[in-house]
Image (spheres, rainbow, N blue to C red):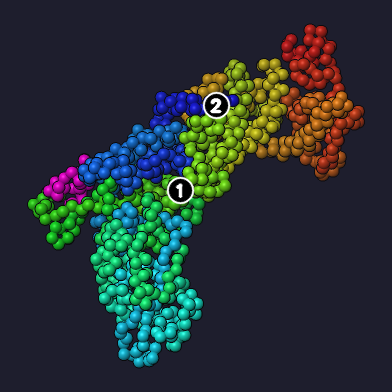
Amino acid sequence: MRANARQREPEIQAFWTEQRLYERLSQQNPGESFTLHDGPPYANGALHVGHALNKILKDIINKTALLQGKKARFVPGWDCHGLPIELKVLQGLSSSERADLTPLSLRQKAHAFALEQVEGQKQGFQRWGIWADWETPYLTLQKDYEAAQIGVFGAMVLAGHIYRGLKPVHWSPSSRTALAEAELEYPDGHTSPSVYVAFPVVELGEALASQLGEAAANLAVAIWTTTPWTLPANLAVAVNPNLDYAICRSGDRHLVVAAELSEGLAVKLGIELTPLCRLKGAELEGIVYRHPLLDRTSAVVIGGDYVTTEAGTGLVHTAPGHGVDDFNTGKKYGLPVLCPVDEAGYLTAEAGPFAGTNVLKDANPAIIEALEAAGALLLQERYEHRYPYDWRTKKPTIFRATEQWFASVEGFRGAALEAIAQVEWLPASGRNRIEAMVGERGDWCISRQRTWGVPIPVFYHRETDEVLLNGATLSHIQGLIAEHGTDVWWQRDEAGLLPAVHAAEAAQWRKGTDTMDVWFDSGSSWAGVLQERGLGYPADLYLEGSDQHRGWFQSSLLTSVAVNGHAPYRRVLTHGFTLDEKGRKMSKSLGNVVDPAVLVEGGKNEKQDPAYGADVLRLWVSSVDYSADVPLGPGIVKQLADVYRKVRNTARYLLGNLHDFDPRPQAEGGDAVAYAELPLLDQWMLQRTAALIDSVTGDFERFEFYRFFQALQNFCVVDLSNVYLDIAKDRLYVSGAGEFRRRSCQTVLHLVVERLAGLIAPVLCHMAEDIWQNLPYPVAEASVFERGWPTAPGDWRRPELEPPMAAILELRALVNRQLESCRKQGDRGSSEGREQGIGASLEAQVQLTLAEGASTTALAEALAWMASSAHPSVDNLTDWLLVSALHIGGEAPEAVLAEAKADGVTVRVARAAGQKCERCWHHETDIGRHPSHPTLCGRCVAVLEP
């Protein structure tokens, strides 16, 4: 019963390795190929339960495919480039070591660190019983992978999808690099110092001035912003041409605000706002205002639909260097892209008196104070809203215009949306999610200002900044990287990197220093793995967390569509996130983290943290509806361990009763009874087994593993333990070793245990193999995985056995309730109590009376069905009810202990006549009649003295 998983599971894994089981099955299986492409986890940090959920789900699917005879190769991957690894390396160095660091030496240290992390995570995955090409995983730092990635980039360049431009991008001052959407997170509770500001108007067109009359005097346009630090970059105020605006008197000045907001603004700002006239936004175009803090005038311009009355004043402060909408509007009006912020987030000299302040620290208070001093501040207040943070440093980002490399999604957005429609999304809501993201996303910023990554293989003219990026340079660099890896970009100068056709002009060019977004790295895996390794492209399945709709699913889709016009996957399956038992996110501060290593191997305090083994972790993955977020905690682990032990104990019982069984047919000298000769009870058990195989097969094909978990529990606890094995004990323990009633039962046990091992193998892989290694008779296959997916012969499927058996089991439940009430009487301490009750059910006799009528028809038919059996020694109601005697009809027994009526059936329980047989525990009237065995019944004597 003690699985001793900490020792036994590694032994089983060593057996698989020795047998090269995964390698042989994945390459030599007779069926079609099946590819579940692994999304690469990041090569940094210890494995957590999120890793377990993901990788075990994949392994369950792959092992099922292998059992079904498919060639299911699984190449595990790791994402190895990027900022977290670079920071880890830097954090591990002293200040003097950092000062001596070159880009190349940093890359070498990062490379070594990533490989070390991969090795640690790999061992953890293997301990969970995950099967994969562990000796040849794919790493995004491998030469062949990097070369394939450059190939994807090059194909997109030549197709016109890659461009360089000065645009506002999400910039992380804490990382000093541009970020893509997938690298952002939006934590709750962020507040910004929002301000309402009046920009004084200095020039009106004659027509508008005439129209406004007195309202034109001392006029100002009112704006609202949550980023006061962007005000030094203000170059316009945008209005919606179709909105109504009001010129309102406010003390000694006039303010322009959206008409429908005027009343609310008056209350919020605590000022008088008396509307004097209304006009359309289009009529405001061309108004010139003075910047309240800098010596600059700008104009009111027409913006787009982003100018609304949902918040603010209906007039939008426009800084083309600090927002996408602002940039697009500024481009329309030919405004410069002013960005007075450096890479560390400090305002530059272009910000005038605010130069040197940090936009996320002291710039806002300084600017607000200046606005107040200038009489331009209408109101300041804290404003809570969604705000993007760097997902790595957990610090706020800003919009900042820089020269970056972009993938123009606009060039293939339609094709991407068509490709999404061709994919099967599980759950189906995944399609809506990724369609919305792809449909709305802007161009993809793919350049990063880091050292540890794949270089963007571009050259810039030293004098004109002209870009050199063509088929010849791309092909040449790809060849160099395939041979030497991406370090070659840092090892060689321009002369050593340029192709022969440009060699003579090498001195004119300088190589770029940007690296590619890591999402471009992993998003190229369809080329670097599926195509390069011949796994099949598109893949049959991608499976990751639901957050990857904005991450890996999307970057893979975009690169694949841009290059080849279709998605890299046929199906996409997503899972939720892991939470504690109270539905909270796991965190060290809450102390609610479940460490999978401790769950599997045990903790320092074995009583508190026993070693449950990998199969219990795997059982948890199969037990949850992973389409939503899934809980895990100590209580859940204990429940799972109970289920695990129940399945294991059931298997032990089956195996223990097969110690002397030869599974060959009796006609060939074995012990197995032919199906047609089996009693009804045995045929029903095989029908239940066939039904289990059919349902579980469907569960696995639909990836609904929690249904398998429920079906397995029901089969082991109800069908086997509570019914079949409960009844079978007498057949197995009391009958003669070679008697038909025992051999027929053993026939069923061996057929069931082999199939049970096969059905649980994808999930409880170690237990399944343990069962197989402990079969007490020889089998052709060394491993359960070589047997293949369990099947049931056609003649096992006898659904007509279910209704009569259901009627009898209903009767059995009714009888058991009465027996239990008698047991409770027998448990009383007094002799009177013991006389009125019974202990074991074999101390009882039962009398049944069936009233005439429709309500008893099903039971009457079931009793007739049982009476028709050719094997009354097995198919008899006395044994099935586990009592010593049964009477149908007739007189009620004397001294009835319990009586119940239900649906026309009357059940009466009384103490059985006779004495208890010392061997079979039945109460019989012939005890003492056999001199050689005075304490045994005649049946037992016949077994002992045949």
- The x and y percentages for residue 905 are 83, 38
Q: Can you see residue 297?
A: yes
Please give left or right for residue 323 compared with residue 925 in the image: left
Query: Percent from the top left, x then y, of residue 529?
Result: 33, 43
In-image side of 160 versus 27 (left or right): left
Looking at the image, residue 730 lies above or below residue 199: above
Tag of residue 3:
2
Q: Nearer the viewer, residue 650 or 290?
A: 290
Mark 2 and mark 1: Cα distance apart in space: 32 Å
Few, some or many residues within 10 Å of mark 1 (<14, 14–19, 20+) = many
- Disc 2 or 1, which lies upstream in sequence? 2
Magenta stretch? 471-497
Quadrant of the image for the N terminus? top right
- In the rendered image, residue 490 lying in the magenta stretch gets the answer yes
Determine whether, in the image, residue 883 is placed left or right of residue 398: right
Please tell me how crowded label 2 is: few (under 14), some (14-19), or many (20+) other residues with Cα within 10 Å.
some
Residue drawn at x 40%, y 82% is 255
Q: Main secondary structure of the magenta part?
A: helix
In terms of depth relative to the viewer, which is nearer, 34 or 357? 357
Task: Tell me which corner region of the image, top left, top right, bottom left or bottom right, holds residue 873.
Answer: top right
Q: Look at the numbered disc 2 and give the secondary structure of its residue.
A: loop
In the foreground, 795 or 685: 685
> Residue at horizontal 86%, vertical 28%?
833
The answer to whether any part of residue 162 appears in the image is: no
Q: Is residue 63 magenta?
A: no
- Residue indicated by mark 1: 545
Asked if the residue at tag 1 contacts the one at tag 2, i.e. Cβ–Cβ closer than 8 Å, the answer is no
